[in-house]
Amino acid sequence: MPWCSASPSPTSLSRFVLLAILVLLCCSFFAVAQNTPVDAEGHQWWQHAVFYEIYPRSFADSNNDGIGDLNGISSKMSYLHNLGVDAIWISPCYPSPQVDFGYDVSDYENIDPMYGTLADFDGMVAEGRKQNVKIILDFVPNHTSDQHPWFLDSKSSRTSAHRDWYIWRDGKGPGKPPNNWISIFGGSAWTLDPTTNQYFYHFFYKQQPDLNWRNPAVEKTMLDTTRWWYQRGVSGFRLDAVDTLFEDPELRDNPVLPGTNAQGDPNMENQYNDKLPQVHEELQKLRKVADDYNAVLIGETWTSNIAELDRYYGQGSHELQLPMDFMFTMVNQLSPPEFRRQIAAVDAAHGWPVFVISNHDIQRSYNRYGDGKNNDAIAKLMGAFYLTLRGTPIMYYGEEIGMENNDPIRREDVKDPIGRTGWPKEKGRDGERTPMQWNTAPNAGFSDATPWLPVPPTYMTHNVASESQDANSVLNLYKKVLALRHTNQALLEGSYVALNKNDPNVMSYLRSYKGEAVLVALNMSSTPRKVRFDLSPLGFGSASAPSSLKVLIASQAASAQSNEVSLEPFGLLIAEVH
Ligand code: GLC
Ligand code: CA
């Protein structure tokens, strides 16, 4: 056999050397490519991926107990792939007493039996690999459940091994907590535990005691946990509530502001228990581990300006790749000037933009932007909008079918505790967490059993099966836009340039890349609009021979002629520029 001849001829020897060099080169290229840029623009996988948040209780129920589960998610993997989703972020599915529906974790390295087993998890990862859908878990580093063995040990005595894993302090006097800090879910952030007669700190419910991240054992254990999941096939984490990882060691009182919040507590500036500088040191450590696995970190970061957002990217981009920018979700009206301001700001920030319009903590976008009459048109408009911006979009399950909030009507029906304590001002978050609407069968095809939260009556029209049959549905608009953004170079790589910046009604912009461009025009008003675009300053066409537009995706009555676009109320148009 020629390849094992004992004395190779000079030519076969040099061929062999050449081949060896080639193999070595290839190997080192792939090794580098695994952790570094995946395309010519230096963009990595998470910059082109479309993320989709799944609230596991509500996505698909495989064993008909009324609660969604991991096998349910696996069974919908091809749906997700066909929709154009590249990665799913699953809200916490670890063992939990479910006081905060999973955000109170009692074991970080397991799956709650209600959602399945670790084997089901592995099956879901495998199914995801088949369908090219990566799995992102929700990591809850700020606090555990009060039923976590660490906390049970911690509270058992002042000298227990885990005592310093949480934040314990003496009160200021009888009945007086250590300071004036308020839990975001209502009442003092301190609860007295009678066993040791000290207070423990909790930024959220008292069943969610804050971990003490100043303790190196806590830090090490939590970093190891992320590693454990990466090795199990997870491609990243959404980091819950990172703003509140650290507290002032002196526990100084926060400044009190005028007025009270929905829970009846005084308004407060969380100067000493929110966004402390140490947060960033931890994020850098979490990121280092993530980088070993080419994983992404998405942060729940409630920033109110770009300087704050920039801090989360980190100098040299060594913190969060994708800090969630909720400033966009706070534009609660169809306001082109406001959206332009937000996008320009994020675009100028020192990291890759993230766009989100709904999640499990805020009212669904369908209701927030809808005017009650044109909600479907507006849902499509919003989809065409944030899915064509420069950045990574994070969708929320059901958004693609125009799912609406189904808020509880009676206090006794509320499941989310803050809805009970805050009723009626705060109705809680049940409304945005209802079961996914798959078809017109009872319970919207989510489960044969009564679901843990009721589906809204509109599931008869807004569901995956019916909308798949309707070319003009919200679902089909999402599918078309997602398909386009996966293949169109201008949408994948292009810059964002706002057009007609003074137009108060039509939001429009150009995404352009190496001479290719896509124009997006969105009528955010309730009257028909005609707009003209002069793209010659941007290098497309000239004043005498304007560029022309070739429609790629448009609402029913929208059209483009030469460089002019006509849009019906809330109409949308996405066109290639020639
Ligand atoms: C985050 C979650 C929210 C949860 C809270 C406490 O804000 O998104 O659902 O209640 O953290 O973990
Ligand atoms: Ca189930």
Image (spheres, rainbow, N blue to C red):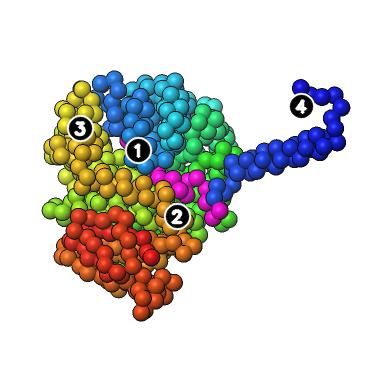
**Circle 4 residue:** 3
**Circle 2 residue:** 489
Residue 98 is situated, as x and y percent measured from the top left of the image, at 33, 29
Between the residue at mark 3 and the residue at mark 1, the CA separation in whole angstroms equals 17 Å
User: What amino acid is found at the position of numbered circle 2 in the picture?
Assistant: Gln
Q: Is residue 24 magenta?
A: no
Between the residue at mark 1 and the residue at mark 2, the CA separation in whole angstroms equals 20 Å
Between the residue at mark 3 and the residue at mark 4, the CA separation in whole angstroms equals 61 Å
Label 4 sits on a secondary structure element that is helix
> Nearer the viewer's eye, disc 3 or disc 2?
2
Give the magenta part as a residue range: 40-56
Q: Quadrant of residue 476?
A: top left
User: What amino acid is found at the position of numbered circle 4 in the picture?
Assistant: Trp
The residue located at (35%, 24%) in the rendering is: 71
User: CB atoms at circles 3 and 4 under 8 Å apart?
Assistant: no
Specify which label sits upstream in the sequence, 1 or 2: 1
